[in-house]
Image (cartoon, rainbow, N blue to C red):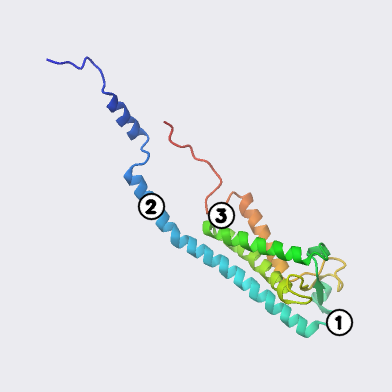
Amino acid sequence: MSRHNGLVNPSQHSESEREACPQGRPSEQAAADDQQASETPLRRRRTGLLAAAAGVTLVLDVLSKIIVVAALEGHPPVKLLDGALYLVVFRNSGAAFSLGTGLTWVLSLIAVGVVAVIIRMASRLRSAGWAVGLGFVLGGALGNLVDRLLRAPGPLRGHVVDFLSLLAPDGSVWPVFNLADSAIVCGGLLLVFQAATGRDVDGTRSSRSPGCRP
């Protein structure tokens, strides 16, 4: 007659450990697959939101530049809001604050790089705030890039059309800007807010949850 003498089968330990920390179980894998499948429509909606924000920004910027060039270039500045805002056409070969004058082709390549980075980030996009912010930046970058590609004096060297001047008709108080510049600034501020409040591109919060220890 055999006895176990109080000994425990080592396999019982491994089974109990697996129950305490159930990693790699089929049910968990199925849950992960279901979560991934449910995230696909969300990613598409957020990508669509980014595209919509970028598209609206680009269309408004291009149309506004066409209108002001046709109606205001060569004419005196138009005073609006009792002098708080002036409409005046200004051709800018550099960046904001007239920086980078003479390096238009470098600024064009930087804009192309910004567009490429945002498009690449779209695959991880789950957050509505990030989608809108990136869309504004993308649309603004594309708007100014269109000028640099299509306007005189030539491709990658075209001068950007600025036409909004605050408090003075000559940009002496604040540099003359356009709708694309405004969209880039607003989008950038929104992205900074998203990052500062812990909202990540994938829609999660920046926090760590304790994992299952062996």
Q: Which residue is mark 1?
A: 76
Q: Tell me which label, 2 or 1, sits earlier in the chain.
A: 2
User: Who's the residue at 42% across and 54% down the image?
Assistant: 36
Per the image, label 3 sits on a secondary structure element best described as loop
Horizontal and vertical percent for residue 203?
A: 52, 54
Q: CA distance from mark 2 to mark 3?
A: 21 Å
* Residue 194 image-quadrant placement: bottom right
Which one is closest to the eye, mark 3 or mark 1? Answer: 3
Relative depth, front residue between 189 and 202: 202
Q: Tell me which label, 2 or 3, sits earlier in the chain.
A: 2
Relative depth, front residue between 150 and 11: 150
User: Who's the residue at 44% across and 60% down the image?
Assistant: 40
Which one is closest to the eye, mark 2 or mark 3? Answer: 2
Q: Tell me which label, 3 or 1, sits earlier in the chain.
A: 1
User: Who's the residue at 69% across and 74% down the image?
Assistant: 61
- Amino acid at pointer 3: Val
Q: Which residue is mark 3?
A: 201
Total marks placed: 3
Which one is closest to the eye, mark 2 or mark 1? Answer: 2
When the figure is inspected, residue 177 is found, relative to residue 4, above or below; the finding is: below
Residue 85 seen from this side: no
Per the image, label 2 sits on a secondary structure element best described as helix
